Image: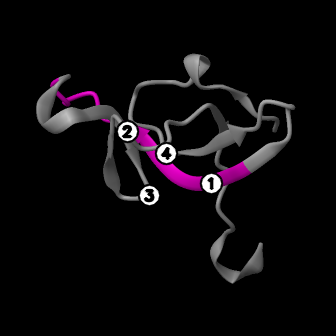
Amino acid sequence: AEWRPIESAPKDKNILMFAVTDVAEDGRVRNWQMASGFWNAGYVDGHDNCTPWRWDGRQLKVYDHQPTHWMPLPTPPRAGGG
């Protein structure tokens, strides 16, 4: 699986991996963060200055780093190592 632009992320509460970048003016990546998260379809825009994305178990504030890319989580391993 490869990273995809956040605009293409499904909004059906699938759990995803997000990546956030902070890029310097010269193009260098200064900060890269990953966490599980999802689109909160029941969220009302503008409430408490948050966005509809939930990241690492919390609702994102508009001033937090916003997700820029996503990737589907891999299939979890089976019990018994199979």
Measured as percent of width and height from the top left, residue 60 is found at: 35, 43
Q: Amino acid at mark 4?
A: Ile
Residue drawn at point x = 42 percent, y = 24 percent: 11
Secondary element at image label 3: loop
Q: State the image quarter where residue 77 is shown.
A: bottom right
Q: Which marked residue is nearer to the observer: mark 4 or mark 3?
A: 3
Q: Amino acid at mark 3?
A: Asp
Q: Are marks 1 and 3 in contact (CB under 8 Å)?
A: no
Residue bearing the label numbered 1: 34
The span from disc 4 to disc 2 (Cα, nearest Å) is 22 Å
Label 4 environment density (alpha carbons within 10 Å; few <14, some 14–19, many ≥20): some
Secondary element at image label 2: loop
Number of the label disc, if any, that sits on residue 61: none
Q: Which marked residue is nearer to the observer: mark 4 or mark 2?
A: 2
Number of the label disc, if any, that sits on residue 56: 3
Residue bearing the label numbered 4: 15
Label 2 environment density (alpha carbons within 10 Å; few <14, some 14–19, many ≥20): few
Q: State the image quarter where residue 64 is shown.
A: top left
The span from disc 1 to disc 4 (Cα, nearest Å) is 13 Å
Residue bearing the label numbered 2: 63
Q: Amino acid at mark 2?
A: Tyr
Compare marks 1 and 4 and give the one earlier in the sequence.
4
Compare marks 2 and 1 and give the one earlier in the sequence.
1
